Every structure is written in C-alpha cells, then in structure tokens.
C-alpha cells in the first residue's frame, strides 16, 4: 500500500495562532486526500476531501475558512487551522485512497496531535 | 449521508474466547466495509475489509460477515490474545467512509 507521512507529529500552539499540517504521499500519486479529525475517545470524523489542483470539498458543519486546505501537488496536501482555539485540540489524520483499484482502500497517515493552549 | 452504528462500545473477553462486534449502516449505496484496529495515539490499521459482492471473508483468526439486505456487518475475532486489546472501528461507504463510534476491546489474560 501507499506510504503516507504527516508533519508535524505533534504541535502545541497558543490560542489565536495558525498551524499548518502537512500530509505527504511518499510513493503514490494522490489526486485526492481525505482529512479526518478525531477527538479523544471518539471516532474519526471526515472533515474534507482535498482535490489536487482544485478546491477542497468540506463536510457539513466544517468551516472552510477556518480549516484551509491546499493540495498543490500529487504528493502533498496541507491543512491549516487558522486562529486556533482550545476546542480545535484534536488528532488530525489524513488518508490517501487507492485510486488504482476499485477496492476503495484508504492509506492513513500517522496523525498529528494538535494541542491549543 | 451514511450513518454507521457500532455495538458494543466496550467488550471484555477472556483470553482464548471469541469477540464479536456488530455494525449497521444506512446507505444502500455503500459497497465497501473495512474494519480498523487503532492503538492509542496511532493511525487506524486495516485488519480486514469486505466488498458488497461478498458475504463473508476470513483471515486467520479474523472474519467479517456482511448482510446487505439487512444493512449490517460484523467482525469476529477467535482465540483472542492480549495483543488484540485495542479500539476497533467499522466503516462503510464508497469512495468516502463513515466510521462507527468504536469498540474498546480488552482481552483478559
């Protein structure tokens, strides 16, 4: 399967600042990437679908102006949490779908732990 | 959109016994049903998946069954071991996935 990395693995920031999280597909060209958020002891919730060369598609209830997504190449998508607040503290995980088959399998990154003070 | 319900939320089993987790889904268009194991602070790890044209799939101690008519699918783990202790998530969808709430499995030695 595809190898997906995320950077940073964890980040602590002050309230009101912006944080950028990178998701890289190391060996697989990804026209699409998914961004999930997982609060402690909860499930993964899809935030948005990142599309290479076009605008991201956001799930209902996710503020597109707060969570900026840029998918400028086939190997990199970035999620920027703007004006972060303590309630944005969460585990952010990206995934790359297997577009080469009909199996729909997703390859997950290792996640980024965001703590907003 | 798709709505996935998962039960139970916690499951404690004696080592060597079987564990069963059940999920239901709402969207009849869903055709992909993966199961993930997640350890604390780590990424979800795919343990088994099933497509809508298959009713059952087995991989060593793990099996999944799918009933498309009833819109439910189940994970079966036999001969449980302490290293099976983790949080398990079911998911359903097509290109996008919706996840169940998770089941915390504890295997008692």
Image (spheres, rainbow, N blue to C red):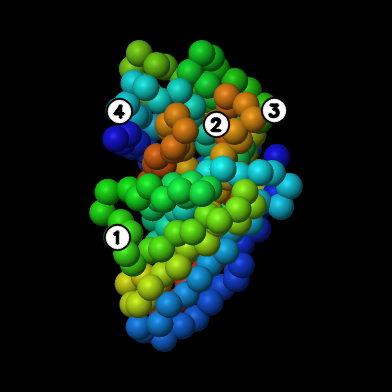
Observer able to see residue A40: no
The residue pinned by badge 2 equals: A104
User: Which residue is farthest right?
Assistant: A27
Nearest-to-viewer mark from 1 and 2: 1
Which residue matches tag 1? Answer: A63
Chain letter of the residue beneath label 1 in the structure image: A
Q: Residue at x 34, y 29 (%)?
A: B25
Which label number is shown at residue B26?
A: 4
**Which label sits in the foreground, 1 or 4?**
1
User: Dots 1 and 3: beta carbons under 8 Å?
Assistant: no
User: Which secondary structure, mark 1?
Assistant: loop
Q: Which of these two is toward me, B5 or A80?
A: A80
Q: How many marks?
A: 4
Q: Which mark is residue B60?
A: 3
Q: Is residue A5 left or right of residue A79?
A: right
Check disc 4 and report its element: helix, strand or loop.
Answer: loop
Q: Nearer the viewer, residue A51 or A110?
A: A51
> Mark 1 and 2 residues: CB-CB less than 8 Å, in contact?
no
Q: Which mark is in front, 1 or 3?
A: 1
Q: Mark 3 or 4 closer to N-term? A: 4
Q: Nearer the viewer, residue B85 or B50?
A: B50
- How crowded pointer 2 is (Cα within 10 Å; few <14, some 14-19, many 20+) is rated as many
Within-10-Å neighbours for mark 3: few <14, some 14–19, many 20+ = few
**Label 3, label 4: how many angstroms apart (C-alpha)?**
29 Å
Same chain check for tags 1 and 4: no
Is mark 1 in CB contact (under 8 Å) with mark 4? no
């Amino acid at each position: 399967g595809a190898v997906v990395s995320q950077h940073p693995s964890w980040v602590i920031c002050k309230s009101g600042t912006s944080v950028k999280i990178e998701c890289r597909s190391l060996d697989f060209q990804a026209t699409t990437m998914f961004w999930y958020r997982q609060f402690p002891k909860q499930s993964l919730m899809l935030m948005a679908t990142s599309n290479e060369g076009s605008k991201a598609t956001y799930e209902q209830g996710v503020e597109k102006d707060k969570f900026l997504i840029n998918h400028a190449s086939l190997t990199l998508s970035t999620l920027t949490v703007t004006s972060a607040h303590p309630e944005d503290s969460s585990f952010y995980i990206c995934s790359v779908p297997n577009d080469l088959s009909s199996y729909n399998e997703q390859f997950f990154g290792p996640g980024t732990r965001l703590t907003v003070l | 959109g798709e709505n996935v319900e998962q039960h139970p939320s916690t499951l404690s089993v004696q080592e060597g016994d079987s564990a069963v987790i059940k999920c239901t889904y709402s969207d009849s268009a869903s055709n992909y049903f993966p199961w993930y194991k997640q350890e604390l602070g780590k990424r979800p790890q795919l343990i088994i998946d099933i497509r809508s044209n298959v009713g059952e799939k087995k991989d060593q101690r793990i099996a999944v069954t799918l009933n498309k008519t009833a819109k439910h699918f189940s994970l079966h783990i036999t001969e449980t071991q302490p290293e099976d202790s983790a949080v398990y998530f079911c998911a359903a969808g097509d290109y996008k996935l919706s996840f169940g709430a998770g089941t915390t499995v504890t295997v008692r030695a």
